[in-house]
Image (cartoon, rainbow, N blue to C red):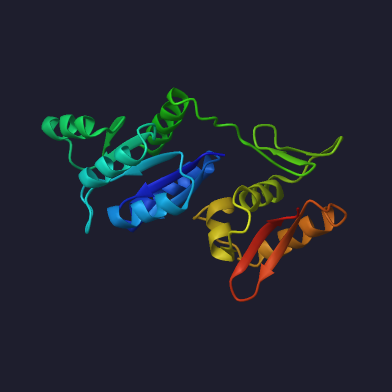
Amino acid sequence: MPTILVADDDTNIRELVCLFLRNDGFATVEAADGKEALAVYASTHVDLVVLDIMMPIMDGWTLCKELRRANPDLPLLMLTARGETWEKVKAFDLGTDDYLTKPFDPLEMTARVKALLKRYRIGTTQMIQFGNVTLDRQTYKIMRGAESLTLPLKEFELLYKLAGTPGQVYTREQLIDQVWGIDYAGDSRTIDVHIKRLRERFADTPDFRIETVRGLGYRLEVCE
């Protein structure tokens, strides 16, 4: 799945953008300023960047210029409260591909992201494969070799989230927010129940394992 870097010094905006992107099947990484965004870009495979203009340490203008210098083919979407015409012209002159003014409709934002990925011919398939296991988020089907499996929706979403970024540790709270939604009022221990069920269902599958990281949460490890 494509990985989107979201660079914005507003924590709430970053969380909102990442939430809607993840709900559409994208992986996300975050940065609170331009300097941090460059560091993340240098250490992580990124398919597209959503960036704010007004950020501390390194602003979006400079970040846009540095990213375009590093990769002329990297899709860039500016997301900012500043919507004057001269600023839009400057953004395009520096190399941004699209420009969205705050406040924004998250659905429009994800639509623009998809359009940019399509323009750059970056695949947006919602399919994850490791070993003999394939997860298809469009059909919510799992193929294990020639065997087709159907899981309860939340079990599938939980497995898909963990499998999307193997090795990454997710806290129970993060998984609740990203799979059940931020308005979920139940007990976070429901994660433990669903993890237990997934482990039982795939106990005989050698392609991956779900590990408990004591005091933190869970991660999925792909077995070579």
Q: How many marks?
A: 0
Is 12 left or right of 26, judged from the image as shown?
left
Q: Quadrant of residue 97?
A: top left
Position of 20 compared to 59: left or right?
right
In this view, the residue in front, 86 or 82, is 86
Residue 86 at x, y percent in the picture: 11, 32
Q: Pinpoint residue 217: horizontal percent, then vertical percent.
A: 61, 68
Residue drawn where x is 16% and y is 29% of the image: 89
Q: Left or right of 213: which side holds 142?
A: right
What residue do we see at 43% from left, 35% from top? 110
Looking at the image, which residue is at 29% across and 38% down?
Answer: 78
Q: Which residue, as the protein is rendered here, is positioned at the far front?
A: 70
Q: Position of residue 114 (x, y in %)?
A: 46, 30
The quadrant where residue 25 appears? top right
Farthest-out residue, bottom:
215
Up the image or down, 8 lies above or below 134; here it is below
> Can residue 32 be seen?
no
Position of the N terminus by quadrant: top right
Give the answer, above or below, for where 200 lies relative to 133: below
Q: Nearer the viewer, residue 133 or 21?
A: 133
Can residue 143 be seen from the camera position used here?
Answer: yes
